[in-house]
Amino acid sequence: MANWVDKYRKLITSSHKSHVIIADQDSLFDYAELQHAVQDNGYKLIRASTHLSVRIRFELEVRDSDQKCLIVADPSYCPPPDISTEVHFQAIGLKDLFPHLDAKAIYGLSFNALCLLSNIKPYEELGHEKTLKFLLENLYNVDFDTLTNSKPKERILNALITVFLEKNAINPPLTAFLTKLARPYFPDLITKGLNKEVLINYLHRQWMACVSGAICDVDFEDAILNKSFGYLFVFDHLNHIKVSVERFQTIPKSLRIGAYVDENEGNDTELDALLSYLEQQQSRIEDLYDQWFNFVQVLGKAKIKDMCSNNQQLRNRFNQVLTTLNQRFQRFIDNTYVSLFSLSGVRRPVVVSRVLEYIKAQPDQRKALLVIDGMNYWQWLLIARELRDSGLTVHSKTTLAFIPTITAWSRQALFRGNKPNLSETNSREAILFVDYWKNTGFNDYQIGFMRFSHNNPLDTDAISDNVNILGLVTDDLDYIMHGSVLGSDQLMASTLQWIQQSRIVEVLKILRSKGFKVFITTDHGNVEATGIKNLKLKEKVGSLSRGKRHIHFSNEAMLANFREQNPELVVGVKDNSVYLTQTEAFTDQYTKVVTHGGSHLWEVLIPFGEVQ
């Protein structure tokens, strides 16, 4: 739980009064996470927009209630004497939670931004402008003091890209501050109103001018701006432009990510640029899940380009980048993974067990969850591309699978909405799914659960008009994955074939036509691995389950005995299980397999998509 939410809860807690009225100074109860935190403390949450409605709701629902109640009132509310004797009253705003920062300057920041701020303590009380500078430096890593030094135009543009595109969470006071700062250098940009869309259009025009040899107002080769330049193409804010061979040769190498000559050349040029971006960023990555969530999107794009390339040097370079990133990812798993299960899923499902909580928080009347078993992140990018090409709107996000990444446990975590029972399989997943939604207030007839496959297509006509919550499962890609004896290259070809033959795009379009917002995820990913050895009988003694990447033992003694017999193995240990962390497999030596069960980043960083 975020520090500022903990502080808020302490401020409203009374030792002798059950009911609370809050004068919500800065609309903090608009944050769903705060609402859920209060409800988790046993309060019934009541909103009252006027003084009269506070009186009515208090008399009808609070005065004689045995349940703890919390009324959220408007900022100017002050209770009359008869109510104040019955409740614990507090007028709380940002100034109470962040006393060293200017409340007007931080008003409207995202929940995650406030969480970051709660862990950063300034040494002095800051006024409005100093608070805004503090935000730039601490939330967006923008060094304000250097912005107006040499080449201020490029430095300010780089700051705008960082704030509006890379971080993508800004409040009106900071927008106004940056607008004032940028106006002398970008008058045309500012007159249209500074926002994400306007900034992207401006950058597109400038890049078109640069490529065509026309007058360009921006020096994209500037060392500071060039770092953000690659990001624009990596995350599809700008499109690559096709140019002649002669023109391509004149473009500086650092800018070639934004241009290509032909499809094959374009593939390798983009792969080179993606790898350069990953190599540049990998030393800066920390134990923060959102950084890894962004990284896997770039890595997924690079993997697709890698499998389409005939350049062995580039492919070797990709494998080296992947190995280095996965080694760093294992440190993230060791240091941070377990703590993430306590995070709320209301804003984003950081772990797979919070997916249902996230879906529950969405306002849509009809919602469907499609689980594609065994789907890797780069496979999702192939599917998402087909969905977008068909006219659907797709948002790609990321969540974390349960470790060890076996279907029995990660699928349980997904449909249970909680950590799995390690003594059970996923055979009761339909029951778990229905029970979860019944516990949130839905009736049986409003909940549906269906399985389908390439050989047994989904009968969309069988979906009742009464169903508002629909669970769907297909195991096709998992079967295809386990049968890919030629590795990821074969898996990619088979995935593209499955997309066409399964008619998955048509299925999703039908669900959308029926009014469903569709959420797509998986229970685990997959990784191409190489056999190190088959397990001997004595090494398997005491194992309750085993796969090519994990073994689960009946007790700690059996697990310890296995580790003593295999000191050379680099494994992770969790809940009486050992699992492989790199790209090995428990199968015949040198045999190539595509499988799962360990903690490689391809297995754990899994897609979470939304289709509208």
Image (cartoon, rainbow, N blue to C red):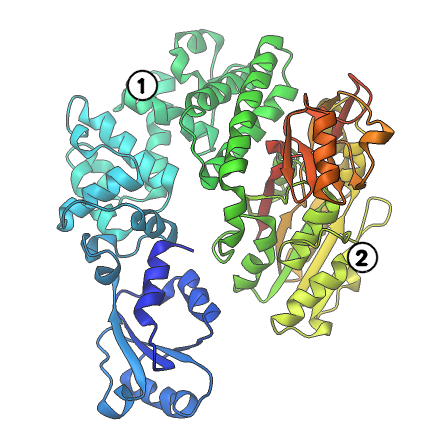
Q: Residue at x 24, y 85 (%)?
A: 79
- Where residue 611 appears, x then y in whole percent? 59, 50
Residue beneath disc 2 = 459
469 over 535 or under it: above or below: below
Q: Residue at x 21, y 34 (%)?
A: 186
Residue 547 sits in quarter? top right
Residue 187 sits in quarter? top left
Residue beneath disc 1 = 214
Q: Which mark is residue 612?
A: none
- Where residue 533 appears, x then y in whole percent? 79, 21
Label 1: few (<14), some or many (≥20) within 10 Å? Answer: few
- Helix, strand or loop at mark 2: loop
The amino acid beneath tag 2 is Asp
The amino acid beneath tag 1 is Ala
Q: Is residue 49 left or right of residue 335?
A: left
Q: Residue at x 62, y 61 (%)?
A: 367
- Where residue 40 appears, x then y in whole percent? 48, 68
Q: Nearer the viewer, residue 288 or 379?
A: 288
Nearer to us: label 2 or label 1: 2
